[in-house]
């Protein structure tokens, strides 16, 4: 079976044919040993065709397509023109060796050309890469290196520009810096405590906060100079007058040794550095909160800014976190414990970085694993919404947080939570209403100029219209009252007529009266018979005959 090799160089596509492999051997070790010798390798591998790229932009386009495993039209034409045709239903007598299995599967799927990618092909392509300038005679000595350098720079620059995750790089750097600052501030503040305790050891028990201790140490300087005049300024720093008085009393009966002015100056400078670092840490935290609200607002509102930033930094980017299933996100940060448990066949960890969330701390011991699994599920949903949605809203994160709160109540009190479909429907409706509200002011602002021009005329017309509306409403009410009075009068007339007829019939006796009543009844029945059936007419006639006999 013939073997062809596809080599994607920086200057173009090269198609080579490998024949007579018996000279160098069919094993990878034999090929590896013969690659360095051009005389042996050149007899086996020969150039079939070389199609150079038209420009640097075309080279970048082809390089991006090959790296993503896509078959371009140019590469397809190169393969179809230079390789033998594959007949349907018959086994092909050749195969194409490629370096990347992704592009090989794409070629075999679209063009039906059989491809292979293994160690043997990789060693052959390594030899082609080593002696490529010898295979192509038109290439000069430095052309290939220049093309490789230019394509490498443009490819890297395009990847950095096209990097979707470049925004969350700031979050990753900020959370790393925040963690290191916490460690540094803690160690530096302990150093200030130890250093200043030689001079004023009683201050450590009075003030516990590190930042406040450094501030007080910088203010006091020499304890012998501390008097009751400085109590007011000490209360401003400490925030408690009793503590300020206690510090002054402790300074009077302190057991610490005296320090020289040079040592006190160094202590003050170091305390100032600790204060500056802690203030910078606060600003960095505010920056991180603002960045997280821009990049991943739903994840931040669900689990918090710091824990969300740690998840993003551990995954590498927001896109990688969105690709993670909830089971992976649950143990993210506990990889050592997981592999140790798998090695020793012990219990696997229930949670990783999400343990720092307040939800797991609030859950009982038996429900910690269940709430961690549920929280990881909601975090994966929130990260996917943040990664792939066009508009950033915190609505979904707030709704997901409500669901976690309901699940906590369900585990503790047994209150049934809402269904996920209902919660998501309400979240989508609220997002749509918010978008409608944001779009409405834009339309109004576009018409402000027209409204200002016709303001006076509109106000006058508005007054006239109001008066017209009032008159219309009053006239309408009067007409309705008039109609209702007419209907009442007609009903009263009908009642009076009926009463008069009944009185006349009562006055007339004998058969004539009966006959008149029967005639009246028959007339009424005739009217009904027009609407009714013939059976009703017969029944009415029988009744009149019976009355006559009586």
Image (spheres, helix red, strand yellow):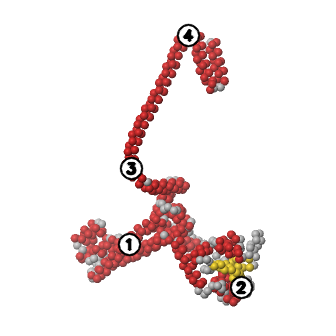
Give left or right: position of 3 versus 251.
Answer: right
Labels 2 and 3: the sequence-earlier one: 2
> Pointer 1: what residue?
280
Viewer-side residue, 506 vs 259: 506
Give left or right: position of 443 versus 328.
Answer: left
Number of residues whose C-alpha sits closer than 10 Å to that of mark 4, classed few (under 14), some (14–19) or many (20 or more): few
How far apart are labels 2 and 3 at the CA level? 90 Å
How far apart are labels 2 and 4 at the CA level? 139 Å
> Pointer 4: what residue?
509
Give left or right: position of 49 versus 317.
Answer: right
The residue that appears at 51% across and 16% down in the rendered structure is 500
Q: Taking 356 as reference, is 141 above or below it? A: below
Q: Taking 45 as reference, is 109 above or below it? A: above
Can residue 179 be seen in this snapshot?
Answer: no
The residue that appears at 46% across and 73% down in the rendered structure is 173
The residue that appears at 69% across and 75% down in the rendered structure is 79
Number of residues whose C-alpha sits closer than 10 Å to that of mark 1, classed few (under 14), some (14–19) or many (20 or more): some
Residue located farthest toward the right when viewing the structure as drawn: 90
Question: In which quarter of the view is residue 186 placed?
Answer: bottom left
> Number of numbered discs present?
4
Q: Taking 399 as reference, is 237 above or below it? A: below
Labels 2 and 1: the sequence-earlier one: 2
Labels 2 and 4: the sequence-earlier one: 2
Residue 2 at x, y percent in the picture? 74, 79
> Pointer 2: what residue?
44
Give left or right: position of 297 versus 459.
Answer: right
């Amino acid at each position: 079976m013939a073997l062809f090799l596809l080599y994607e160089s920086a200057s173009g596509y090269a198609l080579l044919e490998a024949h007579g492999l018996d000279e160098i051997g069919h094993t990878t070790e034999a090929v590896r040993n013969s690659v360095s010798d051009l005389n042996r390798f050149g007899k086996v591998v020969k150039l079939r065709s070389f199609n150079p790229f038209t420009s640097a932009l075309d080279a970048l386009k082809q390089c991006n397509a090959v790296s993503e495993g896509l078959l371009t039209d140019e590469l397809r034409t190169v393969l179809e023109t230079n390789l033998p045709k594959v007949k349907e239903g018959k086994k092909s007598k050749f195969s194409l060796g490629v370096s990347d299995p992704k592009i090989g599967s794409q070629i075999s799927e679209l063009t039906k050309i059989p491809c292979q990618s293994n160690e043997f092909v990789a060693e052959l392509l390594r030899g082609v890469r080593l002696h490529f300038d010898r295979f192509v005679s038109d290439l000069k000595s430095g052309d290939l290196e220049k093309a490789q350098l230019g394509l490498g720079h443009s490819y890297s620059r395009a990847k950095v520009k096209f990097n979707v995750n470049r925004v969350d790089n700031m979050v990753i750097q900020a959370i790393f810096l925040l963690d290191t600052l916490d460690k540094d501030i803690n160690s530096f503040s302990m150093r200030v405590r130890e250093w200043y305790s030689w001079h004023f050891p009683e201050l450590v028990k009075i003030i516990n906060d590190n930042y406040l201790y450094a501030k007080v140490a910088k203010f006091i300087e020499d304890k012998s100079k501390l008097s009751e005049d400085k109590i007011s300024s000490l209360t401003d720093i400490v925030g408690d007058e009793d503590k300020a008085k206690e510090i002054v009393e402790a300074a009077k009966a302190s057991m610490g040794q005296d320090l020289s002015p040079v040592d006190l100056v160094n202590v003050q400078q170091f305390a100032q550095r600790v204060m500056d670092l802690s203030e910078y840490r606060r600003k960095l935290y505010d920056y991180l909160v603002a960045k997280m609200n821009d990049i991943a607002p739903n994840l931040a509102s669900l689990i918090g800014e710091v824990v969300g930033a740690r998840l993003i930094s551990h995954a590498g980017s927001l896109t990688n976190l969105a690709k993670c299933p909830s089971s992976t996100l649950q143990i993210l940060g506990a990889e050592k414990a997981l592999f140790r448990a798998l090695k020793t066949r012990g219990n696997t960890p229930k949670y990783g970085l999400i343990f720092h969330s307040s939800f797991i701390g609030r859950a009982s011991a038996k429900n910690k694993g269940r709430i961690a699994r549920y929280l990881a599920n909601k975090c994966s949903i929130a990260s996917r919404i943040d990664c792939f949605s066009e508009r950033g809203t915190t609505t979904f994160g707030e709704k997901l947080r409500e669901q976690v709160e309901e699940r906590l109540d369900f585990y503790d009190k047994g209150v049934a939570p809402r269904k996920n479909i209902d919660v998501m429907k309400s979240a989508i409706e609220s997002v749509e209403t918010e978008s409608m509200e944001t779009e409405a002011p834009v339309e109004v602002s576009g018409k402000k100029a027209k409204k200002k021009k016709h303001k006076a005329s509109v106000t006058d017309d508005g007054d006239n219209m109001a008066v017209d509306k009032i008159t219309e409403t009053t006239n309408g009410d009067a007409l309705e009252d008039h109609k209702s009075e007419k209907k009442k009068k007609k009903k009263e007339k009908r009642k009076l007529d009926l009463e008069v007829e009944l009185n006349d019939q009562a006055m007339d006796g004998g058969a004539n009266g009966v006959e008149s009543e029967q005639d009246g009844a028959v007339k009424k029945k005739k009217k009904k018979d027009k609407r009714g059936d013939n059976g009703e007419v017969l029944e009415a006639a029988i009744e009149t005959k019976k009355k006559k006999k009586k």
